[in-house]
Amino acid sequence: MSSYLLRVFRGFKVKVGSRTEDRLLSFLVCELNRRWDSDVPLEEQVYVAFDLETTGLHPFGGDRIIALGAARLENGMITGDFEQLVNPGREIPPVTTALTGITEAEVADAPAVEEVLPAFLGFLLQGIPLGFNADFDLSFLNLVLRLFAGSKIARTAVVDVLTVVQALHPQWEHCLLDDAARYYGVPLEGRHSARGDAVIHARLYWSLLPVLAQRGVYTLKDLRGYLYFRSLL
């Protein structure tokens, strides 16, 4: 473990996984990073939207993951989901409990994040990963993956729904999930839960596909080009 990561995790009980588990994590990350460009129409793809709940906003300042959630999206329908509480190894601030409803008692017997990641990443591999403000979630995930797998999920492995929204609506410089969902008529059920937020931005993404088609964006390859043209990739 590097001295830098030791400083980041100082004060926390870090359990280093077995070599077999670490190799599995590394393999799953490599598989996620290999997939993106495709000529398959966007509406025919399978997607897996994902979201995290955390103790706060600063992974390099001691904040940690407290919940992982994901939802598989096929033909506009949610066809599977994943949700798991995680013991962060630190206290959960009252403001976080008020927002997410997750208490310290609920995570006391929950597994550590490295124990959950193989199942979580395996679920993500069922489709094209979708995030909303993906850089935030990846900063938390990759901090753990660098520690246990020596690798990270590439930003280009994830379709960021926020970036797509901003490409379609350049005036929405500081767009929130709530605002975009309301604009496109997506219900905000389960807001501020990991699974709930994943479902919301999955449905939001599906609502964007007709708008993208109007701009000549029909495939993931087209979408990459469109975002690159908009200087958002």
Image (cartoon, grey):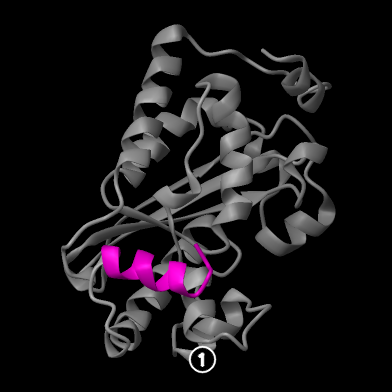
Report crowding for label 1: few under 14, some 14 to 19, many 20 or more residues within 10 A (C-alpha).
few
Q: Is residue 41 left or right of residue 94?
A: left
Which quarter of the figure has residue 62? top right
* Badge count: 1
Q: Let me know if residue 232 is in the magenta part.
A: yes
What residue span does the magenta drawing correspond to?
Answer: 220-233
Q: Label 1: which residue?
A: 183
Rendered location of residue 115, percent (x, y) = 49, 25
Visible residue check, residue 12: yes
Can the viewer see residue 111?
no
Q: Nearer the viewer, residue 206 or 88?
A: 206
Q: Circle 1 — which element?
A: helix
Relative placement, left or right, of 109 versus 90 is left
Could you say which is closer to the camera, residue 232 or residue 166?
Answer: 232
Report the amino acid beneath label 1: Tyr
Residue at x-position 53% and y-position 69%: 231
Identify the residue at horizontal 16%, vertical 63% (top origin).
Answer: 40
Q: Main secondary structure of the magenta part?
A: helix
Question: Is residue 130 shown above or below 148?
Answer: below
Q: Quadrant of residue 204?
A: bottom left
The image shows residue 114 at horizontal and vertical percentages of: 53, 26
Residue 64 sits above or below residue 209 on the image = above
